[in-house]
Image: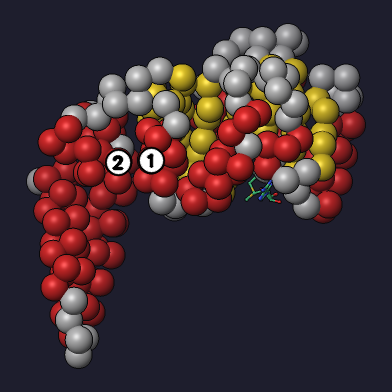
Amino acid sequence: QLSKRLTLVAEYLPHGSHFADIGSDHAYLPCYVCLRDSEAQAIAGEVNQGPYNSARQEVEKHELQDRIDVRLGNGLEVVQKDEVDQIVIAGMGGPLIRDILEEGKDRLTSVERIITQPNVDSKSVRQWFYKNDYELVSESIVEESGHIYEVLAAEKGDPSRPYHKESIEKEMWLGPFFLASPSETFIKKCQEELNKKEYVLRQVKLAVEVSESKIDRLQQEIRWLKEVIE
Ligand code: SAM
């Protein structure tokens, strides 16, 4: 059974997708999608030999070798120009996802949709989309085994569309769609974040050399989180 997290990611792939799953590990996502959709095709990219071997085994187990190509390589270098319509990068930190997108920019010309699931720091992914003319089109959030996961999808378009000039900094950090209609899970995530920020603020105030700008920043973030929760 595929995790709730990856099932949510899979929902972002249209029927008959030709997609690449970068950092595929066991290739669970492409196998799940191709077993349910006979027209789907995938590239499972892996930079490490161990996960690459696991991905090959999983694909062979389901006899999907003719529709899932497992490739060893760094980031988007496993994808040729115009080969896929969607890219999935899931289960990594936001900064790593951003770096993979940045390094492989030239491979994205035919890509209609980028689906990401950053484990931490989703802001770096939103910022990359914004700077590279990708419009954030959807955000989802799911809780599984005590963790809260975000899924962000973007398409070529107007990168400024989901944001409001006066609150763009807050929206880049927390997510414009989440803020516009906060779900229970999102509020829970904000509460957890608030607890962490309040703890950090107490520690910073105890420090010998107190940085005023750091305190201001933390207090601003705490106000934003309280706006969501209260
Ligand atoms: N995508 C799967 C998921 O969401 O469950 C696996 C996530 S796993 C935590 C991260 C995987 O990304 C690892 O298998 C790792 O080897 C791979 N990875 C890390 N950096 C990579 C890169 N630059 N290019 C390709 N794969 C990478």
Q: Which residue is mark 1?
A: 127
Q: Tag 1, which secondary structure?
A: helix
Q: Residue at x 35, y 26 (%)?
A: 159
How many other residues sit within 10 Å of disc 1, few (<14), some (14-19) or many (≥20)? Answer: some
Work out whether residue 99 or residue 194 is closer to the camera in this orientation and state it: 99
- 57 sits left or right of 108 in the view: right
Residue in front for this viewpoint, 129 or 21: 129
Q: Amino acid at mark 1?
A: Gln
Q: Earlier in the sequence, mark 1 or mark 2?
A: 1
Find the residue positioned furthest to the bottom: 208
Residue at 87% x, 39% y is 57
Q: Position of residue 99 (x, y in %)?
A: 55, 47
Residue 17 in view of the camera: yes
Q: CA distance from mark 1 to mark 2?
A: 7 Å
Whether residue 89 is situated above or below residue 16 in the rendered picture: below
Q: Is residue 83 left or right of residue 212?
A: right
Q: Is mark 1 within 8 Å of ligand 1?
A: no
Q: Residues within 10 Å of mark 2 (few under 14, many from 20)?
A: some
**Residue annotated with mark 2:** 172
Q: Quadrant of residue 31?
A: top right
Would you say the residues marked 1 and 2 are in contact, meaning their CB atoms lie under 8 Å apart? yes
Nearer the camera: disc 1 or disc 2: 1
Q: How many marks?
A: 2
- Residue 34 visible, this orientation: no
